[in-house]
Image (spheres, grey):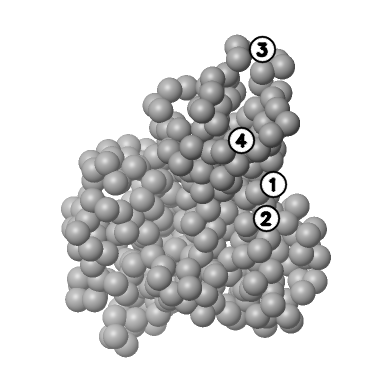
Amino acid sequence: MTRGTDTTHLAAWDIGGAHLKLAVLTARGGTLMVAQWPTPIWQGLHHLEQALARACKTLREYPLQHVVTMTAELADCFESRRHGVQQLVNLLETQFAPAPLYFYSPVGLLSTAAVRADPLCAASANWHATLQYTAARLDSGMLLDIGSTTTDLLPFHNGEGLAQGGSDLERMQHGELLYSGVVRTPVYTIATALPWRGTWQPVIPERFADMADVYRLLGRLQAHQDVLHTADGAGRERTDSARRLARMAGTDLAGATATALQEWQAVAGYLEERQLQQLHAAAARLLSRHPELHGTALVAAGAGAFLSARLAARLGMVCIHIAELLHPPLALRQQAGTSASALALAHIACQQLGNSSGSAAETATQQR
């Protein structure tokens, strides 16, 4: 994996606008750590700086080399995506120095100098790493990575990715990126009315509640997936989520009784179904473009992987959790599914940086 030492570990980072994800492989390629921290970068870059400092503190006993992918450059604290990449490169180089640092791009691993020369070459490429890893291990199927904010729908066939889009703009146009997730997505983007006490109650188009409230009420979210602030900054108990959901309908939670919670759990179940319908429509569109994928595997990843089995049944596909391909220790299986992009990136970089003929990053940089 490394050049010049058999003790250097590899830290793979996926820097999103809402979460920092980390996967660490030992010098022998075993999975040492998979973790996630909240980083609401739109509120300021200091959130990322603090999370990086906490993460690096846990790793200080290990000699490391680092590889990074990012989507955070899209956060509106940056004047442009290009500016965002440049700011992140500067921050990471300072944080990780003097350890080796590489950036993932679809053409290979790049040096900081290469990314500075062409910042967008490393922008929003985490999906490509996960797709590349998955397609190399399954013949055909669709990778469905349902995250906190977005969903990646990535078809592959004969070991090759079939994605038509590159940038977020293109991927949305081609239906391969859907801004719908199981934590941060506002409820009003999922439904405009709710079935409530025998009527269709209009939904207020304000961010009073997020889909995390829906999945807390339904008991779907794991603790490590539910780390961001709530819509009103209050608690994460089911009564808190029911209260926020009631506000979406312009009313209040009628006490913390079992009956009151059941009423809003039923509403939450409807919202889950509406989100499933969104995902079903997006996946059906891609399958109509790639009919050869009918009956193949749907690979489930992300915080919303719990939705994938039901979606696979509707699509006539076999559901496989991505942890079955990543092979993490059993204790890290859930974290691996949530942070699949970081762990997939770690395995890709482990292979590429282990080339005895020289660094894959140097080769890719020369090709550019």
Q: Quadrant of the C terminus?
A: bottom left
CA distance separating discs 2 and 4: 20 Å
Q: Earlier in the sequence, mark 1 or mark 4?
A: 4
Please state the horizontal and vertical placement of residue 296, each as a whole percent of the image: 76, 71
Left or right: 350 in relation to 213: left
> Looking at the image, can residue 142 be seen?
yes
> Can you identify the residue that label 2 sits on?
277
CA distance separating discs 2 and 3: 31 Å
Tell me which residue sits at (74%, 53%) in the image. 309
> Can you identify the residue that label 4 sits on?
201
User: Is disc 3 surrounded by few (<14), some (14 to 19) or many (20+) residues within 10 Å?
Assistant: few
Q: Nearer the viewer, residue 166 or 351?
A: 166
User: Is disc 1 surrounded by few (<14), some (14 to 19) or many (20+) residues within 10 Å?
Assistant: some
Q: Which secondary structure lies at badge 1?
A: helix
Please state the horizontal and vertical placement of residue 170, each as a whole percent of the image: 43, 74
Q: Amino acid at mark 2?
A: Gln
| Label 2 close to label 1 by CB (< 8 Å) | yes
Q: Which secondary structure lies at badge 3?
A: loop
Q: Earlier in the sequence, mark 1 or mark 3?
A: 3
Q: Amino acid at mark 3?
A: Thr
Please state the horizontal and vertical placement of residue 260, each as a whole percent of the image: 66, 18
Q: Earlier in the sequence, mark 2 or mark 3?
A: 3
Task: Please tell me in which quadrant of the rendered image residue 349 appears.
Answer: bottom left
> Looking at the image, can residue 98 be seen?
no
Which disc number belongs to residue 257? Answer: 3
Please state the horizontal and vertical placement of residue 301, each as a whole percent of the image: 60, 55
